[in-house]
């Protein structure tokens, strides 16, 4: 996101590479699609920060930088010379961004974690899945992704703070804090009304109807989030008894009669194909969509028209298809067309162009193992 908005972003990896380079699936060039998905727009340098020479290179790069983003555990950061205290003393104007699993306070502050652990710990998994089943993870790593968005927001806020005060600060974001914030009205419902959310499959525990339904040849998702739409839904489906029932006129009443409503709708939707029901519901201004697989979603004209999929050329000449940042500005080009870097792809160029090192010095660093 920062690269898309014009920042020069340098990714610093260990000589062994970012661990998600090893996570499948892999494309025809044996590159991890996981790695490709989050590294567009960056130049890459590989440094062994256990080496004093490599730390010297990092400090020289930081001295020219506005922002440093890392996700080391605190003890690891201190051991590698990139802990908060060390950096703030050396680089008082630097914006330091720490991304952790469990936050910077408390007994778990030094513990590692991943997206699914945060979903489980926060309670998100407890409200995700079928009503009579175990909790399940969301299909996308949304805690990871949203934490990155919060980090981006924190960077911009900290840079504005520096513009006003003249000094940098530390931005701290974590998977746990992101996941808790994402509970939103579910958390407030418990805190203020004592209402503990529960699993409801594709539905939501406090709204009826609002879920997916099977049709003859696929699935649709539809619902009535207000009383006016409920009337439209009943009209569209000729459910006259439901429309006239006083017990079902409010969402509160419909929640109390969830099973009756859902079963009646499911029986009806099974009688016709998806296209029929989409046309009928759209005609009556009832929100509805086909439940798409990802291949169909990415090929849909609406996604194509909004240019969410972009194609870039890599250094070797092959091309790679990725996703763009989901916002833009009318009067600015908000996209970096730099393909994700191979491990250490730009090491020599960065050392030469940013730090002014001679070729002999770079070769010496490579022989010492400080740079790959």
Image (cartoon, rainbow, N blue to C red):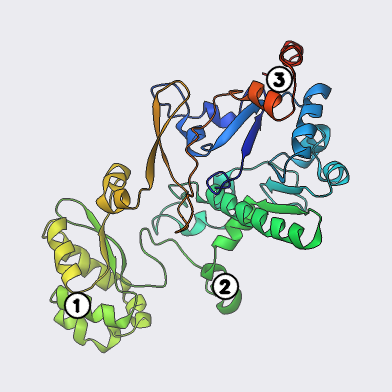
The C terminus: image quadrant: top right
Closer to the camera in the image, 33 or 66: 66
| Residue 220 % position (x, y) | 24, 58
Residue furthest to the right = 89
Q: Which mark is residue 188?
A: 2
User: Which class describes the residues within 10 Å of circle 1: few (<14), some (14-19), or many (20+)?
Assistant: many
Q: Which residue is depicted at the point 53% across and 49% down?
A: 145
346 above or below 321?
above
Query: Dot 2, crowdedness within 10 Å: few (<14), some or many (≥20)?
Result: few
Numbered tag placed on residue 234 in the rendering: 1
Task: Report if the CB atoms under discs 2 and 3 are less than 8 Å apart.
Answer: no
For label 2, the SS is: helix
Q: Is residue 136 above or below residue 27?
A: below
State left or right for residue 218 relative to residue 304. left
Distance from the alpha carbon under mark 2 to that under mark 1: 32 Å
Q: Position of residue 152 (x, y in %)?
A: 61, 52
Point 30% across, 48% down: residue: 304
Question: Mark 2 or mark 3: which comes first in sequence?
Answer: 2
Q: What separation in Å lies between label 1 and label 3 (alpha carbons)?
A: 67 Å
- Taking the image as shown, residue 135 lies to the left or right of residue 249, namely right
Residue 260 makes an appearance in the image: yes
Confirm or deny contact between disc 1 and disc 3 (CB under 8 A): no
Q: In which quarter of the view is residue 367 placed?
A: top right
Height in image: 66 above or below 46?
below
SS category of the residue bearing label 1? helix
Residue under label 3: 371
- Write the residue at 59% across / 62% down: 181
Q: Residue furthest bottom?
A: 246
Give the quarter of the image for residue 177.
bottom right
């Amino acid at each position: 996101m920062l690269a898309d908005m014009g920042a020069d972003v340098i990714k610093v990896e260990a000589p062994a590479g970012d661990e998600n380079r090893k996570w499948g699936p892999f494309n025809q060039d044996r590159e991890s699609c996981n790695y490709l998905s989050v590294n567009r727009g960056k130049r890459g340098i590989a440094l062994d920060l256990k080496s004093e020479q490599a730390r010297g290179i990092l400090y020289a790069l930081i001295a020219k930088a506005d922002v440093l983003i890392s996700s080391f555990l605190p003890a690891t950061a201190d051991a590698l010379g990139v802990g908060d205290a060390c950096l703030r003393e050396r680089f008082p104007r630097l914006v330091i961004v720490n991304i952790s699993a469990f936050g910077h306070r408390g007994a778990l502050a030094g513990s590692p974690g991943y997206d699914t652990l945060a979903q489980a710990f926060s309670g998100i998994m407890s409200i995700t899945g079928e009503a009579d089943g175990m909790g399940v993870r969301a299909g996308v790593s949304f805690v990871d992704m949203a934490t990155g968005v919060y980090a981006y927001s924190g960077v911009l806020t900290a840079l504005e703070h520096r513009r006003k005060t003249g000094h940098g600060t530390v931005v701290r974001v974590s998977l746990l804090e992101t996941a808790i914030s994402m509970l939103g009205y579910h958390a407030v419902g418990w805190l203020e009304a004592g209402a503990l959310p529960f699993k409801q499959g594709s539905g939501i525990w406090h709204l009826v109807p609002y879920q997916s339904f099977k049709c003859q040849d696929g699935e649709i998702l539809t619902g009535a989030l207000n009383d006016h739409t409920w009337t439209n839904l009943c009209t569209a489906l000729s459910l006259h008894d439901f429309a006239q029932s006083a017990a079902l006129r409010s969402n509160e009443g419909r929640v109390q009669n969830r099973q009756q409503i859902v079963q009646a709708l499911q029986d009806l939707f099974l009688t016709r194909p998806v296209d029929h029901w989409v046309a009928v519901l759209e005609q009556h201004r009832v929100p509805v969509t086909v439940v798409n697989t990802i291949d169909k979603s990415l090929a849909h004209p609406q996604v194509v028209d909004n240019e969410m999929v972009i194609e870039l050329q890599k250094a070797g000449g092959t091309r790679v298809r990725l996703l763009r940042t989901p916002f833009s500005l009318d009067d600015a080009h908000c996209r970096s067309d730099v393909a994700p870097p191979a491990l250490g792809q730009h090491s020599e160029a960065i050392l030469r162009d940013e730090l002014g090192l001679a070729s002999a010095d770079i070769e010496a660093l490579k022989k010492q193992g400080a740079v790959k």
